[in-house]
Image (spheres, rainbow, N blue to C red):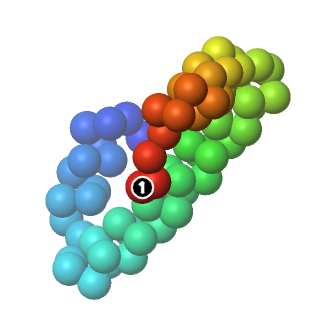
Amino acid sequence: MANIAEIKRAISKLCADELAKFRAWFETFDAARFDEKIRRDAETGKLDRLANEALAEFRKGRAREL
């Protein structure tokens, strides 16, 4: 398995086209990992307190359209 330094060296050697492809792949990869963490946190109740606070603020009329 490559370490961080080896990965950095390999990325720095990519041509512009390969770097763009890597960047697009990594963005998709990273978003999927983030989505999975949010899903797990929601399922285990880690987001309940924040959701309840947001709903309470909404019910008090302290919400605004984004």
Closer to the camera in the image, 57 or 17: 57
Residue 32 at what x, y percent from top left? 61, 53
Q: Secondary structure at mark 1?
A: loop
Closer to the camera in the image, 1 or 21: 21
Residue 26 at what x, y percent from top left? 44, 59
The answer to whether one can see residue 35 in this image is: yes
Residue drawn at x 35%, y 66% is 23
In this rendering, is residue 31 above or below 43? below
Name the residue at the front extreme.
61
In the rendered picture of this protein, how many numbered marks are placed on residues? 1
Disc 1: CA contacts within 10 A as few (<14), some (14-19) or many (>=20): few
Q: Is residue 50 left or right of residue 20?
A: right
Q: Is residue 55 left or right of residue 65?
A: right
Q: Is residue 26 left or right of residue 55?
A: left
Residue drawn at x 44%, y 60% is 27
Name the residue at the right extreme.
43
Q: Which residue is mark 1?
A: 66
Q: Is residue 17 left or right of residue 54?
A: left
Residue drawn at x 31%, y 76% is 20
In this rendering, is residue 66 above or below 37? below
In this rendering, is residue 43 above or below 26? above
* Kind of residue sitting beneath label 1: Leu
Closer to the camera in the image, 6 or 32: 32
Residue 46 falls in image quadrant: top right
Residue 56 at what x, y percent from top left? 62, 23
Residue 50 falls in image quadrant: top right
Residue 1 at what x, y percent from top left? 50, 39
Residue 29 falls in image quadrant: bottom right
Residue drawn at x 21%, y 78% is 15
The C terminus, quarter of image: bottom left
Closer to the camera in the image, 32 or 4: 32
